[in-house]
Image (spheres, rainbow, N blue to C red):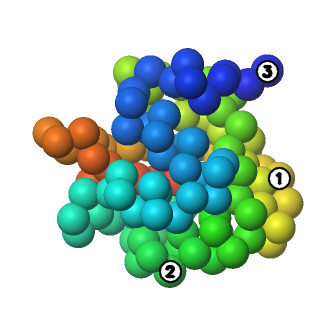
């Protein structure tokens, strides 16, 4: 059973999931701190290139199964048109201004 997005504990993470699921690239980019970084399965990736390929051009969607660490760690059933559906882990670092400075994802 998934958690409703509006019930996620961390406001920045809640906005991140909402932007991904709405395919709202502008809202997504506004959530990221300047110079934000990310990694996928332990490898650093270019945020703009990765998110375009894995989220926006491939209709990415996050169904959150559970959260921990105050809402900054998620277990997600993630799907997109490229890879289909898979269980993934997501971890977020939120800076003092409430923007995401780093996120990492990988298979769960």
Residue 62 seen: yes
Above or below 62: residue 11: above
- Of callouts 3 and 2, the N-terminal one: 3
The answer to whether 39 appears left or right of 82 in the picture is left
The answer to whether 84 appears left or right of 15 in the picture is right
User: Crowding near pointer 2: few (<14 within 10 Å), some, many (20+)?
Assistant: few
Q: CA distance from mark 2 to mark 1?
A: 21 Å
Give residue 49's mark: 2
Q: Nearer the viewer, residue 11 or 1?
A: 11
Residue 42 seen: no
How many numbered badges does the structure rendering display?
3
The quadrant in which the C terminus is found is: top right
Residue 98 sits in quarter: top left
Secondary structure found at label 2: helix
Mark nearest the camera among 2 and 1 is 2
The answer to whether 17 appears left or right of 76 in the picture is left
Give residue 1's mark: 3
User: Crowding near pointer 1: few (<14 within 10 Å), some, many (20+)?
Assistant: some
Badge 1 vs badge 3, beta-carbon distance below 8 Å: no
Residue denoted by label 1: 85
Residue placed at 38% from the left, 21% from the top? 70
In the rendered image, residue 5, in percent from the top left (x then y), is placed at 60, 29
- Of callouts 1 and 3, the N-terminal one: 3
In the rendered image, residue 89, in percent from the top left (x then y), is placed at 57, 43
In the rendered image, residue 21, in percent from the top left (x then y), is placed at 66, 48
Above or below 45: residue 84: above
Q: CA distance from mark 1 to mark 3?
A: 15 Å
Secondary structure found at label 3: loop
Badge 3 vs badge 2, beta-carbon distance below 8 Å: no
- Of callouts 2 and 1, the N-terminal one: 2
Residue placed at 21% from the left, 65% from the top? 34
């Amino acid at each position: 059973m998934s958690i409703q997005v509006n019930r996620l504990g961390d406001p920045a993470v809640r906005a991140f999931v909402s932007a991904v699921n709405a395919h709202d690239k502008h809202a997504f980019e506004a959530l990221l701190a300047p110079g934000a970084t990310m990694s996928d399965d332990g490898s650093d990736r270019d945020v703009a290139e990765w998110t375009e390929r894995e989220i926006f051009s491939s209709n990415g969607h996050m169904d959150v199964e559970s959260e921990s660490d105050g809402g900054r760690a998620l277990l997600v059933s993630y799907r997109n048109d490229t890879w289909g559906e898979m269980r993934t882990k997501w971890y977020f670092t939120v800076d003092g201004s409430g923007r995401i400075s780093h996120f990492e994802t990988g298979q769960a």
